[in-house]
Image (cartoon, helix red, strand yellow):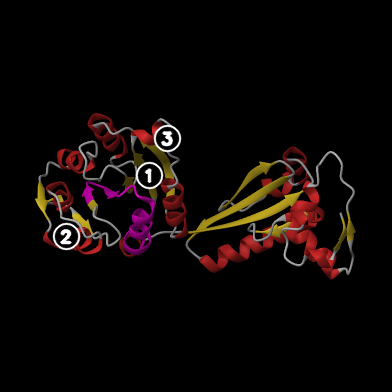
Amino acid sequence: MKASIITIGDEILIGQIVDTNSSYIAKALDKIGVSTHEMLSISDDKKHILDTFITLQNKVEVVIITGGLGPTKDDITKKTFCEYFDDTLVQDETVLQHVIDLIEGFYKRPITQINKEQALVPSKARVLFNKMGTAPGMWMQKENTIFISLPGVPYEMKYLIDEVIVPLLVTQFKRPYIIHKTIMTYGRGESLIAEEIETWEDNLPFFIKLAYLPAPGRVRLRLTARGEDEEKLNEALGNQIQLLHQLIGDIIVGIDEEESIEVVFGKLLKDKKQTLSLAESCTGGKIAQTITTVSGASNFLKEE
């Protein structure tokens, strides 16, 4: 099962804000076995939105859109939905009452016509009630693709994803399990690691994929398993990680990024009852500063 994620807003395209919604949605989908096929950021332009919808139609099972649901004239997602689905806007009484309660009850100010128009939704849409804000989400299907429109405000989007969208997708679709295990390594470059584990990598089961995620001083090795049997996937991943330890165990410091190198280093010193002194020059005390962020560092860091 594949999904595409679209963020709508010129403010993203000009670099005024950073799109964090897409990564949040992708992580939520991944947890329930839905693969994100692509992420797109597009402008607040009706033709651009319609062209994108046409391109994605029947290409993926789910399209999730964030943004463009506000009360101002530059927010055109609802009207564009109506054009794409050959629909009209109608007033949802439940949403209207919620908007009134929020504006007049919580914000203590008179409601305006613009506020009331937040309750307008396409007549064919499944309305996704948004108790965190005034803009409801929308769920509409055309042929083999479901289009889901969500507010761009992050905390409103997160509420709808966690409390509404994910439960609906889980009940509506049969999905495979997707399990990730990330092995943390330090002290050896990506190319050297690749040479050492080449045979192991070539013999990975077909349902397990390896990705290299390098950064200065470290390389993360992400194993991804996809399949129908969660127990077998976890067993297979465990076996492969054991084999990996036999090959490069000297540089593996942890699994799934649970702990940073300074935390692992501190634990090793405590376990071995060893202490550390540092003499720094060009680093300007950076090593000591990093190590002292670890709780209990005073037990093993004796001199700086």
Check disc 2 and report the residue beneath it: 100
Residue 257 within the magenta-colored segment of the rendering:
no
Q: Earlier in the sequence, mark 3 or mark 2?
A: 3
The 10 Å Cα crowd at callout 3, few under 14, some 14 to 19, many 20 or more, is few
Q: What's drawn in magenta, residue-wise?
A: 140-167
- Reply above or below: 78 against 164: above
**Quadrant where the C terminus is found in the figure:** bottom right
Q: Are marks 3 and 2 in contact (CB under 8 Å)?
A: no
Q: Amino acid at mark 2?
A: Ile
Q: Earlier in the sequence, mark 3 or mark 1?
A: 1
Residue 163 within the magenta-colored segment of the rendering:
yes
34 or 69, nearer to the observer: 69
Check disc 3 and report the residue beneath it: 16
Residue 164 x/y as whole percent: 31, 62
Check disc 1 and report the residue beneath it: 5
- Reply above or below: 81 against 150: above
Q: Earlier in the sequence, mark 2 or mark 1?
A: 1
190 vs 172, left or right, is right
Number of dots carrying numbers: 3
277 vs 158, left or right, is right
Residue depth check, mark 2 versus mark 1: number of the one nearer the observer? 2
Quarter of the view holding residue 157:
bottom left
Q: Amino acid at mark 1?
A: Ile
Residue in the image at 22% along x and 41% along y: 72
- Whole-number angstrom distance, CA of label 2 to CA of label 1: 31 Å
120 or 64, nearer to the observer: 120
Residue 273 x/y as whole percent: 88, 69
72 vs 226, left or right, is left
Q: Element type at marker 2?
A: helix
